[in-house]
Image: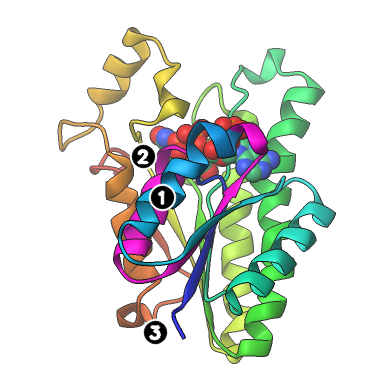
Amino acid sequence: MAKTALITGASQGIGAAIAKKLASDGFNIAVNCYSEREVKNGGNQVAEACRSLGVEAECFIGDVSSFDSCAGMTKAVKEHFGTIDVLVNNAGITKDGLLARMSEAQFDMVASVNFKGVFNMTRHVSGVMIRQRSGHIINITSVAGLYGNPGQFNYSATKAGVVGMTLTAAKELGPRNITVNAVAPGFIETPMTDVLTDEQKAAALSSVPLGRFGKPEDIAAAVAFLASDAAGYISGQVIVVDGAMSM
Ligand code: NAP
């Protein structure tokens, strides 16, 4: 039976690139979309691109910030494909602002998606993987969670929390033959970073020794390695993919 990968927030950006890369590696793909709007505005095209690579692919609507929604989505994916072998916790948002002016809502929104969302999905999907006695969980964190970033108090806190969840889950789930790792992107060209001003982009670029921003495919390559048999003895690690920006 073909293996299945479930990628959260996969209608665009890094998640879409991960879905297509894992499809090219032979995984059936569950494309999580936040709502029907994302299914129409990207999810369907991502699923179609995966199918054109010869695998099965379907969109599954689910809000990662909702425990019950994640339970329903996990059940639906398992029923549809029969197995969940790879979970990529990719969905994430930013609500940037300096700490002195950050509202409680700004903090809570980012925490509910980036931080609690990883708990919600990992809690449900790990149950499936424990019964299978195998699986790979890959969390998309950020260099902001490792080194901090002014204007991203909420975001960097959640991404640091994702690292903590990665390490603990690797220890708890390792005895069940489940690996848990994280990938920490630097500055990647996606809709998330498109909103930055030219001045902000120029400042970011000047700190990248490789002299270019990352592409979603750069992150997808690292995720695909961690999802492969070749990475079977790697767990509890954070792989930084940032063109040496944060060194
Ligand atoms: P993106 O283009 O904005 O994609 C994020 C995806 O997550 C969107 O499809 C979004 O759907 C979805 N999402 C948001 N809230 C959700 C929810 N509650 N439930 C399910 N899906 C939800 O961003 P990206 O740049 O590809 O980022 C992907 C991941 O990489 C994020 O975790 C981000 O923090 C991380 N990252 C990105 C960069 C970068 O430079 N781009 C750097 C470091 C880390 P909507 O379209 O509905 O919002």
Numbered tag placed on residue 97 in the rendering? none
What is the number of the mark on residue 186?
A: 2
Q: Earlier in the sequence, mark 1 or mark 3?
A: 1
Residue 223, position as x, y percentages in the image: 38, 61
Residue 70 lies in quadrant? bottom right
Part of the protein shown in magenta: 12-37
Q: Dot 1 surroundings within 10 Å: few (below 14), some, or many (20 or more)?
A: some
Farthest residue to the right: give it.
Answer: 68
Using the image as rendered, state which of residue 64 and residue 213 is in the foreground. Answer: 64
Task: Give the number of the disc on residue 48.
Answer: 1
x%, y% of residue 202?
27, 15
The amino acid on which the numbered mark 2 sits, given as a three-letter code, is Gly
Residue drawn at point x = 54 percent, y = 57 percent: 58
Q: Is residue 6 left or right of residue 122?
A: left
- Residue drawn at x 23%, y 33% is 208
Residue 218 versus residue 141: which sits nearer the camera?
Answer: 218
